[in-house]
Image: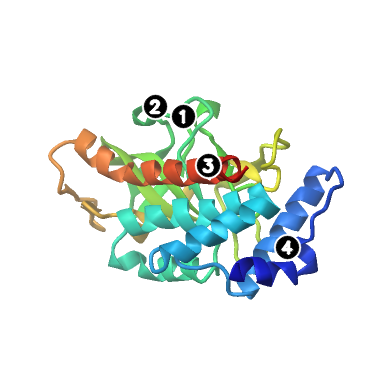
Amino acid sequence: EEIYSILDREPLFARDFRRLSLKEHREINHKRWKRIIELGLVYDQFEDLERYQCLTEVLETYDQGLSARLALHSSVFMTALVSMGTDRHREVIKKAKRNEIVGCFCLTEVSHGSNTQEIQTTATFDNGEFVFNCPNEGAIKCWAGNLAQSATHAVVFAQFHVSGKCEGVHAFVLQVRNMETFEPLPGIVIGDMGEKPGAWNGVENGWMEFKDHRAPLWTLLNKGCEVTEAGSYFSHYKSSSERQSVSLGALSVGRQVLSYVTFTPFLDA
C-alpha cells in the first residue's frame, strides 16, 4: 500500500491507454525506471527481499516491461555477480546495488540457448588479459534484456582458453559501454533485436558481437577458479562439468525470477 500510495501521486505512472510505439514504450520505461530510483524504491533484494518482491508486484500493474527490467538488473545480473564473484568484484557489485551501472546477462547465442556447453564465444588469455571473440555469426550473444540501449555492464559466458587448452565455460563481468559517451567499447558491437509481441516492448533486448575485445584479469568471476598474470590456471572443482554446474547456478535463479515476473499478473487476475 505504501508503494501504491507513492506511485499514485506520480503523473508518470498514470495509465496510458494509447497504443504506444516501440520508441514510446522504451522511453516511458526508462523514465519510470529513473523515477523509482529517485524515489528510493529500488530495494536491495539481498537485504530486504520482502520489500523487493512487493515493488516487483506493484510495478507489474503499471508496466510488465518495467518489472522485467528491474528483475534483469537487480536479480539476474546481480545474483550472478554475488554468487560467482569474490571480494575483487565488491566495487562493481556496490555500483550495481546503487544503480550507478545497468547490467544484463549474456549467455544465449544465435546458435545456442539452453545447450550451454556448446556456446562458441571465446575468452582467451593473452599477456595478462582476456581477449573475447565471436568466431562466427552463430556465436553472437542475443536476446539479452537491457542490452540494446541501457546496459553498461554484462555478465558474459564464454569458452575460456588458456595455455592452449579450453577449460570450458566461464563467466565474466564486462563493461560494454563507455560511461560518458555510451558508445560500445573497442572490440564490441551492440545491436537491437527490435519489436516483440506482448507486454515486454519496454525491455530492449539486444545482441552483442566481440571482435578482439580485451578485458583485465579481474573480470573473471573467480569463485572456484583463478588464473594468474603468468597464465597459470587453477580450479577448485574436479571436472569442468562440476564447475559449470556451479557457474550456471545463477542462471537457474534468473529463470525463477523471470518466471515470477511473467506469471504475477495472472496470479493477481
Tag 4's secondary structure? helix
What amino acid does circle 2 point to? Answer: Asn
Q: CA distance from mark 4 to mark 1?
A: 31 Å
Q: CA distance from mark 4 to mark 2?
A: 36 Å
* 92 w.r.t. 226: above or below: below
What amino acid does circle 1 point to? Answer: Gly
What amino acid does circle 4 point to? Answer: Lys
Q: Nearer the viewer, mark 4 or mark 3?
A: 4
Instruction: Name the residue: 44% across, 41% down.
Output: 255
Q: Nearer the viewer, mark 3 or mark 1?
A: 1
Of the residues under marks 3 and 1, which one precedes in the sequence?
1
Q: Give the residue at mark 1.
A: 113
User: Where in the figure is residue 206, as x and y percent of width and height?
Assistant: 62, 42
Residue 152 in view (yes/no): no
Q: CA distance from mark 3 to mark 1?
A: 21 Å
Local packing at callout 3 (Cα closer than 10 Å; few below 14, some 14-19, many 20+) is: some
Instruction: Name the residue: 15% across, 43% down.
Output: 237
Along the line of sight, the residue nearer the viewer: 160 or 111: 111
Q: CA distance from mark 2 to mark 3?
A: 23 Å
Quadrant (top left, top right, bottom left, bottom right) of the C terminus:
top right
- Residue 45, picture quadrant: bottom left
- Contact between marks 1 and 2 (CB within 8 A): the answer is yes
Q: Which mark is residue 211?
A: 3
Q: Give the residue at mark 2.
A: 115
Q: Give the residue at mark 4.
A: 31
Instruction: Name the residue: 23% across, 41% down.
Output: 243
- Residue 201, picture quadrant: top right
